[in-house]
Amino acid sequence: FTARLGKRVSRSTGEPYYLNVHTKESQWELPKEPAKDQAATNAARGHIWCSHLLVKHRESRRPSSWREEKITRTKEEALALIKGYREQIVSGKATFGELACQFSDCSSAQRKGDLGTFGRGAMQKPFEEAAFALNVGELSEPVFTESGVHLILRAA
């Protein structure tokens, strides 16, 4: 039970304290319950944690990105790119994060596609439905939204 807690010593007082390694919360007294990880807490609140890789096309609601000022590819070309990225991930030739950093048209590319946690109603409906249907660690098939074509990886 203390495996999820880190016993530390305060630099200012020299007294021992306990750090929950999941939430990073600290307290002076030894907790009476085991530390809960953030994934379990988020799941209990109906939140999930996902990353995504977005490929926009000329019919996207905003056909521009940090990568390209004016996106001219067709929806079919965007789908072909997404399918190619998915194949690279599934075959182990590249990681999701590597491809998201390099090719995603979303600004989350700077964070390897990490969107953080979100609940129902926070994302476009097709994205939300696909994300909530995934198991932790599962990669989606291509998902179409008004923004473009996505691959979604559920982290928690």
Image (tube, rainbow, N blue to C red):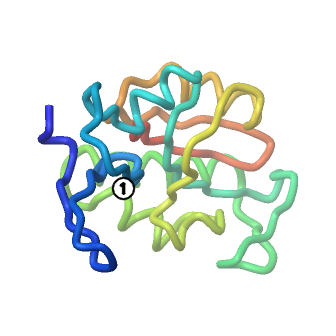
Quadrant housing the N terminus: top left
Q: Quadrant of residue 70?
A: bottom right
Quadrant housing the C terminus: top left
* 31 vs 80, nearest the viewer: 31
Quick check: 24 left or right of 69?
Answer: left
**What's the residue at 50%, 40% (across, down)?**
49
* 12 vs 118, nearest the viewer: 12
Q: Quadrant of residue 125?
A: top right
Asked if residue 39 is positioned above or below residue 57 in the image, the reply reads above
Disc 1: CA contacts within 10 A as few (<14), some (14-19) or many (>=20): many
- Measuring from the top left, give residue 62's x and y in whole percent: 85, 60
Q: Amino acid at mark 1?
A: Phe
- Measuring from the top left, give residue 58's x and y in whole percent: 80, 59
Return the residue found at the far right. Answer: 61
Quick check: 40 left or right of 105?
Answer: left
- Measuring from the top left, give residue 73's x and y in whole percent: 70, 62
* 13 vs 48, nearest the viewer: 13
**What's the residue at 46%, 73% (across, down)?**
102
**What's the residue at 24%, 64% (across, down)?**
15
Q: Which residue is mark 1?
A: 96
Asked if residue 97 is positioned above or below residue 135 in the image, the reply reads below
As helix, strand or loop, the secondary structure at mark 1 comes to helix
* 130 vs 146, nearest the viewer: 130
- Measuring from the top left, give residue 17's x and y in whole percent: 27, 56
Q: Quadrant of residue 105?
A: bottom right
